[in-house]
Image: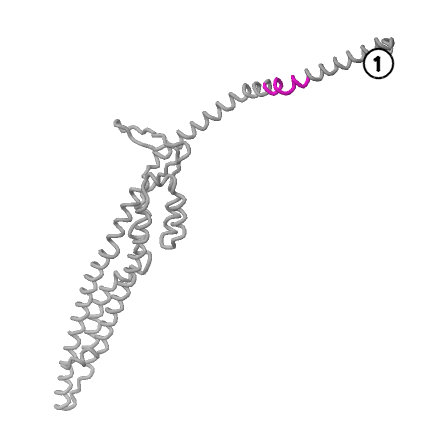
Amino acid sequence: MNLLHIFTDIPILIVIFTFLLSLIYCLKNYIMVSKNLKIFLAFISRFKKSDLNFRFKEIDEWMCMNPYVASIWLEFKNTLVFSESVALKDANNDLTYKEVSSTVQNVQTTVDPMYFFNEESLISSKFNYKFLQTVPTILTGFGPLFTFLNIAIAFGKIDFSSQEKTIASVAGLMSSMQTAALVSVIAVGSSLIFLMFERITYQNLCGRPLGKCEELMGRLFDNISSEKFLLELLKETKIQNNSISNLITAMPAQFKVAMNSGIASNLVPYLENLIFGINQVNKSLKEVAKKSGGSDEVDELF
């Protein structure tokens, strides 16, 4: 059979174009994912667990501004716990608390970061990943579909009206059978090639950066269980209640001290000065009365 005739056959062209378009779609999306994962990886690799305390705002702003991880980050941020103590386990497996700075908060999460930053959220949800998974099946299905279609068309062209036409139609049937078989070979071969290409490309472009991202996020945020979180919340609530109770108990004594201090420092000197002034005025009036001999008139004024 003429090779040019084979590759101009419509079923074969459909299989080849489907294969090539699927390869381009796969490569394009995997390159896009790889680029964004590398940007995300380069950013979070600049942080350490100790830096998280005072650089959380920087992380939050960058995550919210990056459309690739913004929605994932907003969901993950709801699980974060900001506390003034770190929940730890001692040698006896008992829960203890290690105090950190009173002005710096430790950041923990009640859910494993891999629940949010995983293959589903960072890769497969960014494009039509299910279509790529069905491409090998589609290509394989094209094989028997076009094979039986060619056979059916070839059998319909058989002409038994004369010996010459019968021989010619049988020859055409054999040619169509060869093309039909070739369609199945090309379809199954392209399916296998695409499957291997997709797996190798995925691992190199997406799988490795994804593993590093999951590892860094797991190291960056401490995972605290819901039980530990409730214990920590109870501990901090008790501390706050004790502080409020101590403040209320000490308030009357502090108010009394403040009142006495205010009276002693402000009101008493003012009254003393007022009494001293009155005494001076009285003394002056009496001296004036003695000189004028009108002490009775001065006494009547008081």
Magenta segment includes 263: yes
Of residues 64 and 281, the one drawn nearer to the viewer in this rendering:
281
Q: Residue at x 15, y 85 (%)?
A: 169
User: In terms of image quadrants, where is residue 179?
Assistant: bottom left
Magenta segment includes 144: no
Q: Is residue 299 above or below residue 27?
A: above
Label 1 sits on a secondary structure element that is helix
Q: Position of residue 91 (x, y in %)?
A: 25, 27
Q: From which residue to which does the magenta span run?
A: 261-271
User: Badge 1: how crowded within 10 Å, few (<14), some, or many (20+)?
Assistant: few
Q: Is residue 32 above or below residue 151?
A: above
Q: As drawn, is 168 to the left or to the right of 96? A: left
Q: Which residue is mark 1?
A: 301
Quadrant where the image shows the C terminus: top right
Q: As drawn, is 95 to the left or to the right of 234? A: left
Of residues 52 and 74, the one drawn nearer to the viewer in this rendering:
52
Q: Position of residue 241 (x, y in %)?
A: 46, 27
Quadrant where the image shows the N terminus: bottom left
Q: Is residue 190 above or below residue 199?
A: below
Q: Position of residue 63 (x, y in %)?
A: 38, 49
User: In terms of image quadrants, where is residue 22?
Assistant: bottom left
Q: Residue at x 25, y 57 (%)?
A: 205
User: Magenta region's main secondary structure?
Assistant: helix
User: In terms of image quadrants, where is residue 278?
Assistant: top right
* Colouring: one colour
Q: Residue at x 37, y 48 (%)?
A: 73
Q: Position of residue 80 (x, y in %)?
A: 38, 41
Q: Amino acid at mark 1?
A: Leu
